[in-house]
Image: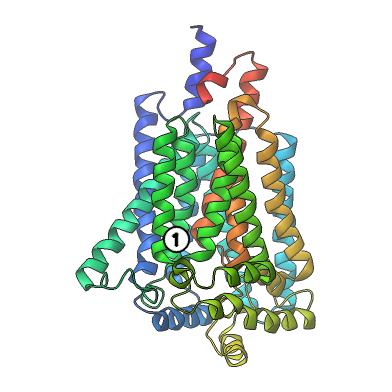
Amino acid sequence: MSKSFDSAMGDFRGVDAIGTERATYRALLALLFVWWLAFVLPPLAIDGIEESLTTADAQTQSGSLYNQVLAAAFCGIGGAALLRQRPRTLPAEALALLLLIAAYGAWAMVTVFWSDDPSLSLRRFALLLLLIGGAGGLGACFYGTRPDGLRRLSIHLMVSAVALIAMLATTLLVRGQFAGATEADWSLKLTITTAAYTYYVGFAAIGALYVLRSRPAWQITTFAIFIAILMALKGRGVLLSTLGTGGVFLARTSPWWSGRVAGRILGVTASLAVVDLGTGGHVFSVIAMALAATPLLDYLTLGAGLDNVLDLSGRADLWPVLLEHVSRRPFGYGFGAFWTPDRLSQVQMQTGWPAVNAHNGPLDELLATGLIGSGLALLLWVYALWLSIRLTRVPALRASAILVGAWLQLMLLFNMTDSTMQFFFQMPPLLTLTAVSALLAQWAGQQDHTAAGIGLEAVVR
């Protein structure tokens, strides 16, 4: 093995090249673990939907100091990663993504001038900058400096999901809440913040498909276990989104023709079902009528059956009300400033239930940043998805690019029936930004080594 190759690999691996770098890596990993605990514990501590709504109203009014400190700490960890490893020069296509992020940020700042709550908009914008800085630093200079960085990120995510589910199971066992778990009306949605669990499980399911792709039996078994957990938690939108994304992943990676065909059928069917639900559920409601008498539909709808499906769990009443608000101010109500305490109460009076977001990411973007901001936001995420698809043509990055593309698809599907676009201090935006940054860093590193005449395909793969 040539000296130049050893030198290049030492630079690409970064954190494990020498003892000092290994210690730095472990220190950053420890800091990230402590931050993760601080990030996940508050939502898990909320006991009941009423407490969740009270917390949301108070934090909207005065801002959450805890979240601000967490965001600053996250940015600090990303900054420490940047100090440890200088980022490489990005290709032109990747720089275009940064320009889109800058354009969206610039428009978000413009909306502050007509925001219903300028101080809230500024706080939310500062929070966004901190999170982008943290995710960019961690992705490009922590996970992206290793050929197996995205595999490690997937494993960290899977361990996180298993730990969260273990904590939940222990809590339910202590409280005696497992009784009646097989009944149709059994649900945790009134006692816990289910999204704090289902998001992790959904992303971890896709991560498992990637990590275990060389062991098909373990791969499918692990994916099925995560799907079963989502069914038990009755996260219906996340369940369909994960099935659709998992099917697309298998369609692109399965070594068997039958696996690719089955994955394509599952991926297209489930993904289109989620898109249909996010646009009114007209087709899905017809299919649900045919399944009206089945135990599965009764279980997933908490015993409400077709009534729950046809009104999309209250979204059918909520979305027309919010679209009326959009029509009044097509340039938005200000970045992060639509859901003020007064408007939370107003929307509840109009719909009859306490919505704290639009349960649709693009709709929340329309409410906050208007037609221009929502267009830029969707263009940003779609362009990142296009980049990941393009990078599947690079042999050394094919598997990693498929993984990142799958996570991007999953986040976009989540936003059909839930909202993480304006409510970005959640796991899906943080993970996808970190993963995209890591993939682009690996691409830049691969191009550097290719230019030097050193092939890394076998190492990265």
Residue extending farthest bottom: 349
Q: Is residue 118 left or right of residue 179?
A: right
328 or 277: nearer the viewer? 277
Quarter holding residue 389: top right
Q: Which residue is mark 1?
A: 198
Q: Is residue 244 left or right of residue 275?
A: left
Label 1 SS: helix
Q: Is residue 143 visible?
A: yes
The image position of residue 338, as x and y in percent, is 64, 79
The image position of residue 65, as x and y in percent, is 45, 71
Residue extending farthest top: 2
The image position of residue 353, as x and y in percent, is 53, 86
Amino acid beneath label 1: Thr
The image position of residue 292, as x and y in percent, is 54, 73
Q: Is residue 250 left or right of residue 29?
A: right
Q: How many marks?
A: 1
Q: Is residue 84 visible?
A: no
At x 50%, y 72%, the residue is 293
